[in-house]
Image (spheres, rainbow, N blue to C red):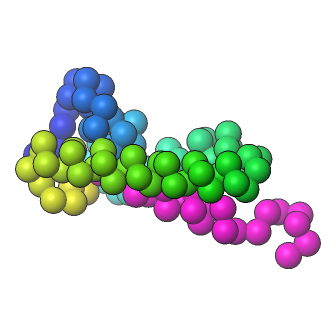
Amino acid sequence: MTPNFKQLITNPDHFFAFGFGSGLAPKAPGTFGTLAAIPIFWLIQDLHWSFYLSWLIVTFALGVYWCDRSSKALGVHDHGGIVWDEFVGYWVTMFLAPKVGSGC
């Protein structure tokens, strides 16, 4: 079962687990989840590494909580529309990638 838009905006677990709605895409929800993570990266990319790492830890931990609750509410283990892992995975990748113009 996939939540509808009303369920998504009224249930914080679904809202975050489904990547602010990007996981509702009928095709390639993971790709849409990654695309939705990019604007957030633009906002956090210049944080000091210690704050960025803290962001990763907090969003990972909250994501485990949100996705678990959302999965249980839907009665589906690892629903394809749950894309919070794409968000955090993208941010981890960008944290570890060399910055453009860094001389690497």
Q: Which quadrant of the structure image shows residue 77?
A: bottom left
Of 50 and 78, which appears nearest the observer? 50
Q: Judge whether residue 37 can be spotted in this image.
A: yes
Position of residue 61 measured from the top left corner of the image (x, y, whole percent): 41, 52
Query: Is 87 a magenta residue?
Result: yes
Q: Which quadrant of the structure image shows residue 25?
A: top left
In the picture provided, is 38 more to the left or to the right than 15? Answer: right
Query: Is 28 a magenta residue?
Result: no
The magenta-colored residue range is 81-104
In the picture provided, is 62 more to the left or to the right than 41? Answer: left
Q: Judge whether residue 31 can be spotted in this image.
A: no
Of 12 and 26, which appears nearest the observer? 12
Q: Which residue is drawn at the image coordinates 49% and 62% (left, top)?
A: 89
Q: Residue furthest bottom?
A: 104
Q: Which residue is drawn at the image coordinates 30% and 45% (left, top)?
A: 66
Q: Which residue is drawn at the image coordinates 63% and 47% (left, top)?
A: 41
Q: Which residue is drawn at the image coordinates 18% and 37% (left, top)?
A: 3
Position of residue 92 measured from the top left corner of the image (x, y, whole percent): 57, 62
Position of residue 86 measured from the top left corner of the image (x, y, whole percent): 44, 57
Number of numbered callouts drawn: 0
Q: Which quadrant of the structure image shows residue 60?
A: bottom left
In the picture provided, is 97 more to the left or to the right than 40? Answer: right
In the picture provided, is 11 more to the left or to the right than 41? Answer: left
Please determine whether, in this image, residue 26 is positioned above or below residue 16.
Answer: below
The C terminus appears in which quarter of the rendering?
bottom right
Of 93 and 21, which appears nearest the observer? 93
